[in-house]
Image (cartoon, grey):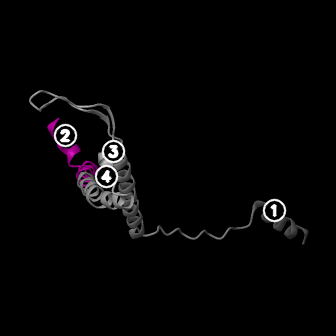
Amino acid sequence: MFKEFKNFIMTGNVIDLAVAVILAGAVSLVVKGFVTYIMMPIIGHFSGGIDFADMKIILDQAVLAADGTVATPENAIMYGEWINTIINLIIVGFVLFMIVKAYNKTKKPVEVAPEAPKGPTDNDLLMEIRDLLKK
């Protein structure tokens, strides 16, 4: 059983999948950082200084205790974070599109063998035989 598991793990597909998952996590962090620290401040600048991460609909205000600590935390719908996530998705999709497009350019096109010249059809052969028999 251990030998079968070892063979399974050492196949190329499992290793390729593991590498892909690790790279996807790293790319996700890079893209999230790009969106959070570069794109969102630019978008916020052109939208009048709005920071999407702070946009929310407060359902219940936070309740403070007598000593100033939070007794009940705020309950809010964080739709600004959702907007950030949508922008992140669009950028990740675009990056993946560009990667696949570049990869497809590196692949050599498969050469299709030229079709063999078509011979005469059965009708043509029968007509030829008929003409030869007439002579």
Quadrant of residue 63 in the image? top left
Seen in the picture, residue 2 relative to 26 is either above or below; the reply is above
**21 left or right of 94 in image:** left
Q: Are marks 2 and 3 in contact (CB under 8 Å)?
A: no
Q: Are marks 4 and 1 in contact (CB under 8 Å)?
A: no
What residue lies at 23% left-to-right and 55% top-to-bottom?
Answer: 26
Q: Which residues, given as a range, are shown in magenta? A: 1-23
Q: Position of residue 71 (x, y in %)?
A: 16, 27
- Local SS, label 2: helix
Q: Secondary structure at mark 3?
A: loop
Neighbourhood count class around disc 3 (C-alpha, 10 Å): few under 14, some 14–19, many 20 upward: some
Choose the circle earlier in sequence order: 2 or 4.
Answer: 2
Q: Which residue is mark 4?
A: 51
Q: Residue furthest left?
A: 67
Category of crowding for the residue at label 2, using alpha-carbon neighbours closer than 10 angstroms: few (below 14), some (14–19), many (at least 20)? few
**Residue linked to disc 3:** 55
Q: Earlier in the sequence, mark 3 or mark 1?
A: 3
Mark 1, residue position = 126
Residue 131 found in image quarter = bottom right
Front label number (4 vs 1): 4
Q: Which residue is mark 2?
A: 5
Q: Main secondary structure of the magenta part?
A: helix
Q: CA distance from mark 4 to mark 1?
A: 82 Å
Residue at 70% over, 68% down: 119
Asked whether disc 3 touches disc 1, contact meaning CB atoms under 8 Å apart, the reply is no
Comes first in the chain, label 2 or label 3? 2
Task: Answer whether labels 4 and 3 touch (C-beta < 8 Å).
Answer: yes
